[in-house]
Image: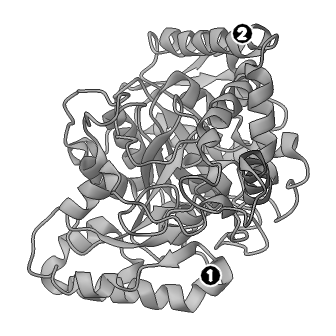
Amino acid sequence: MKPNYLSAGEILKNKHNLLLSDVTKSCIERIDSVDKDIKAFVRVNRDCLKQVGSTDSKGGILSGIPVSIKDNICVKDELTTCGSKILEGFKSPYDATVIEKLKGAGAVLLGKTNMDEFAFGSSCETSYYGPTYNPWDTSRIPGGSSGGSAASVAADETIMALGSDTGGSIRQPASLCGVVGLKPTYGRVSRYGLIAFASSLDQIGPITKSVEDAAILLNVIAGYDERDSTSVNMEVPDYTKSLAKDVKGLKIGIPKEYFVEGLDSEVKKAVVDALGILKDMGADTIEISLAHTEYALSVYYILAPAEASSNLARFDGVQYGFRVKDPENLIELYKKTRSMGFGREAKRRIILGTYSLSSGYYDAYYLKALKVRTLIKKDFDEAFKICDCVITPTSPTCAFKLGEKLNNPLDMYLSDIFTIPANLAGLPALSVPCGFNREGLPIGLQIIGKPFNEELLFRVAYTFEQSTEFHKKKPNL
């Protein structure tokens, strides 16, 4: 088996039998072979082959392990464009904290992956560079907005990847691409160097081939950062120690609001079957109610666009990125740069956000949404008094066809209906493969935990993963 097909855990266990430089070479060869069909990468760092030549004899937790990086995470002196024309040509003058940590651990930065423009989307179709395709069926979307990162892992073009999750943008593409995706607790991983979408929701996290790999990568990137005012100063455990095949006595909450009309029947069956496996291994299930779940989508699409409209105000053609040529005055510079630089979905969210923050509508929409967000968090607080974790489907459907929902934003937004509540409540949530539909498309199981209890998520996910074969199946590329 070529090294690019291995997980990071497998590579690290077999270092003595493997030249680490061969792992990166194998990934580059795989990219050259299949990425013309997948288009997971917007830029491949071929200079990394020079870097990796010196890692065979060096230490570091991720020494010689290739990691692909979502295009909204800053890497010093490299293009970081958020999948948008308006950041065309922008090279970051500094590394994001997670990039500093990856470099310090000896990881090889393989390149930047495609994404929905500024992370606005659930399908990876709104990128300035064009869509990414699902490795399991290239007529379908890989999910979004971290679609490029998820597709690069699923297609074995990389060993691990970083994504960002604002309303499900790690977990949903992980589910649709048949890989593992974790959104850590808000504040667990530094957001310094992540180009913001919605600052109170965004979180960087791992997308990997296995639960073990997600634990390994979180070990590297988690921790307090004084440069991020939302970073929480808490001790970071060794997450790999939680990889025990044991769920005996665990109480799993099953929210009735997540098993409703609109949930694909094959997705529902796969999740129910997965719960049956966990019950057979000693876990107990309890029906719970997260009563305000029905408002989560509405709350998110008031709060997230509002924060986005504020964050995107900085992109005006003055400081960095794309600038319209020969404007007559400053106002024209702003107008033409932003109208030509942003895509349709970015403009839609800027308009929605500006509207809900405007005088006369702030109290009616934005302030009310903040209050309901508090109620959503309280629902989880009450649920966790009687259960240890909550399990739901990750996505209501498997991957849909390219273009199927692109012109129907409301239908597209429903793709995140099961992932958004965890972001609004700031909770950790993990998606792990739990089955395939009759067309051979992956299905994901979502595990939601208490704040800063990623260890339990890894334990449950690892137990399920090691009791099934879903994670071992590969797309036929």
- Given residues 255 and 155, the one toward you in this image is 155
Residue 293 in sight from this viewpoint: yes
- State which tag comes first along the sequence, 2 or 1: 2
Residue at 27% across / 65% down in the picture?
A: 9
Q: Mark 2 or mark 1, which is nearer to you?
A: 2
Colour mapping: one colour
Q: 402 above or below 464?
A: below
Q: 202 above or below 402?
A: above
Callout 2–callout 1 Cβ contact below 8 Å: no
Q: Is residue 455 left or right of residue 294?
A: left
Q: Which residue lies under the disc numbered 1?
A: 476
Q: Is residue 32 left or right of residue 48?
A: right
- Given residues 293 and 270, the one toward you in this image is 293
- Amino acid type indicated by mark 2: Lys
Q: Which residue lies under the disc numbered 2?
A: 368
Q: CA distance from mark 2 to mark 1?
A: 48 Å
Measuring from the top left, give residue 303's x and y in whole percent.
67, 25
Q: Is residue 318 left or right of residue 68?
A: right
Residue 356, picture quadrant: top right
Q: Quadrant of the C terminus?
A: bottom right
Q: Residues within 10 Å of mark 2 (few under 14, many from 20)?
A: some
Q: Residues within 10 Å of mark 1 (few under 14, many from 20)?
A: few
Residue at 68% across / 28% down in the picture?
A: 306
